[in-house]
Image: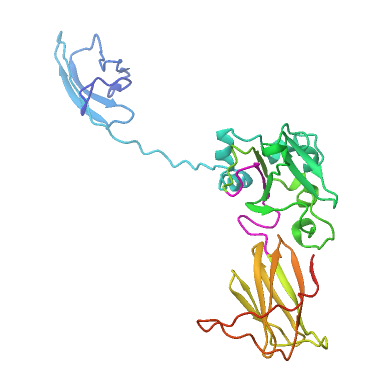
Amino acid sequence: MLDHETGRGVAGVTVALAGTDRRTTTAADGRFAFPSLPAATYRVEFRGLGYGERIQTLVLAEGQTQSLEVRLSPRPVDLPAIAVTIRTDPTLAWLAQRGFTLRAAEGKAMLHATRDQLRQQSSRNLNELLGRVPGVRVRRLVDAGSQLLLEPSPLPGGAPCRVAIYLNGSHVELGRFNWTGENWNQRGSRPVRFDDLVTMSQIDGLELFGPEQNPVASDTTCGALLIWSSVLRPRVDEDFAGTIRGRAVNDQTGAALPGVRVSIRPAGRTTETDAQGRFELAGLTPGDYELRAEFAGAASWLSTVTVQAYGHVELELRLTIGRPPAPARSGGSPAAGPPSSPGRRSTR
């Protein structure tokens, strides 16, 4: 028994003599035999898995030995469809999309743990967990905030080397802006600590890198702590948006000034104060902005404003009415006169 395409012997083919109980199976080289057959005409049937069926007629005389060379053509076997269901942990898939799994395979992190691995720890909170990691120290700040420091410090003179903190890819300045509460929907009055930022049950993945292995290009000196949580704001790659809001008033009378044009750079955002003199610029990426307020018959109000993550900067713009506008600069754009006193400014 040979394969029609390759010419090689085919093993395991069933050979049967129709109308009798005589049958056999081909050997590894494709050979088979039916000894001691009486003279007769035989209908020989060949069936092999993955091959087409073949039937051949053989006339055998008394005392005769017949040799057959049968070639079978391969034929795909149609098998019933098999439904395969792959169950994956959606959280692990979410982490994998953010490079978490790839960085785990590289094995460069000082600490790399999934949610299930963190549950096996005896630490009650993130502050306690980080305090147990060799090479780092959690320092409590006077204002009740927290800092994560490398020890020993790689900075000249052993200056404190702060590890940068990132939640879902967004930079968090612990201890430098006010907490907005669990799930970021309540305002608080004290700086953020690790345990305010996220609880152990809310963490899906945690990565801690030293300065040489730090995957965050914007911070290459003191390493980075990457916290991943699919249940907390900000969502993936969403900035910790902040807000500038306030009120424009007449510096002499304290009366509200509607229609004051308020603009910021480099964001290029502009708004006007309402009937109560109020304005708001929301959705601002944390950073420094140049804020300008302009009103007919008053000197421009100009100041630098720092917006922190999920922070709210409150301003009172006190404009002096009756002072002539500053002369235009070359090119036709107005120049800012001496800014009025910025008034009260608070970040909460």
- Tell me where residue 272 sits by quadrant: bottom right
Closer to us: 28 or 36 = 28
Q: Is the magenta stretch mostly helix, strand or loop?
A: loop
* Residue 206 shown left or right of residue 5 in the figure: right
Q: In this view, does 134 lie above or below 20?
A: below
Quadrant of the rendered image containing residue 267: bottom right
Q: Is residue 244 left or right of residue 48?
A: right
In the rendered image, residue 323, in percent from the top left (x then y), is placed at 71, 89
Start-end of magenta stretch:
218-241
Relative depth, front residue between 95 and 305: 305
Q: Magenta span has 85? A: no
List x then y, in percent, for residue 14.
31, 22
Rendered location of residue 72, percent (x, y): 23, 28
The vertical placement of 330 against 21, above or below, is below
Is 156 above or below relative to 305? Answer: above
Please tell me whether residue 4 is drawn above or below residue 325 in the rendered image. Answer: above
- Specify the quadrant that holds the N terminus: top left
Quadrant position of the C terminus in the picture: bottom right
Residue depicted at 61% across the width and 43% down the height: 92
